[in-house]
Image (tube, rainbow, N blue to C red):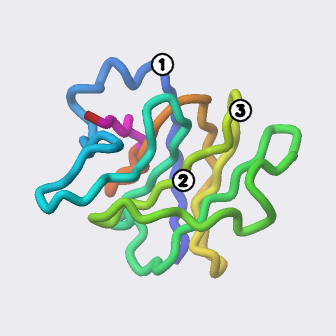
Amino acid sequence: MKKSFGFALVIGLCALVLSACTTTFAKNGSRDARGAKFGGPEEGQTVVAIDSRFVPGWESFYLYAYFDNGAVTNGSWPGQKMKSFGNGIYYYIMPMGLETANVIFNNGNGDQLPDETIIDEAQMILSEEGLWMPWVHN
């Protein structure tokens, strides 16, 4: 299933709506009710995440990243397999030192979403509704 839609990612404006559209997750290194240690992304890392409910039917999630000049940042197509965060959220921690990169979510089996641009140290999630939102860690 391919989805076509247009949306713009504007990091600078996200702060204006931060309190209205954030998804909160446990801080890295904290423990859940069972005492299991959380091992997700840390503050300061560039992280891209997706809510799997936006693309029902996908069983795997990959992220392909490249620069405007065409140089690949994380390997050949389909990119790197994204890690499960739980609750249907998948994420990928971008390589350190990039300023901006273009990313494409795909399922490794031919289906993909349009590419988007991310900025260094942003932590963004593509929501169930298909909106880019800050991914905030408490």
Look at label 2 and name its amino acid: Tyr
Image coordinates for residue 102, horizontal then vertical, percent: 69, 44
Image coordinates for residue 1, horizontal then vertical, percent: 51, 78
**Kind of element beneath mark 3:** loop
Q: Kindly identify which residue carries mark 1.
A: 12
In this rendering, which labeled residue sits more in front, label 3 or label 1? 3
Look at label 3 and name its amino acid: Leu
Tell me which residue sits at (39%, 45%) in the image: 131
* Mark toward the start of the polypeptide (3 vs 1): 1
Q: Kindly identify which residue carries mark 2.
A: 92
Q: Characterize the local packing of mark 3: few (<14), some (14-19) or many (20 or more) Cα atoms within 10 angstroms.
A: some
**Kind of element beneath mark 1:** helix
Q: Is residue 11 left or right of residue 56?
A: right
34 in relation to 59, above or below: above
Q: Quadrant of residue 37?
A: bottom left
Look at label 1 and name its amino acid: Gly
The dot on residue 98 is 3
Image coordinates for residue 30, horizontal then vertical, percent: 26, 44
Tell me if label 1 and label 2 are in contact, CB under 8 Å.
no
**Kind of element beneath mark 2:** strand
- Secondary structure mostly seen in magenta is strand
Question: What whole-number distance in Å separates the C-alpha atoms at marks 2 and 3?
Answer: 14 Å
Question: What whole-number distance in Å separates the C-alpha atoms at marks 1 and 2?
Answer: 21 Å
Tell me which residue sits at (57%, 73%) in the image: 107
Tell me which residue sits at (43%, 56%) in the image: 50
Whether residue 68 is in magenta: the answer is: no
Tell me which residue sits at (63%, 81%) in the image: 109
Stretch in magenta: 132-137
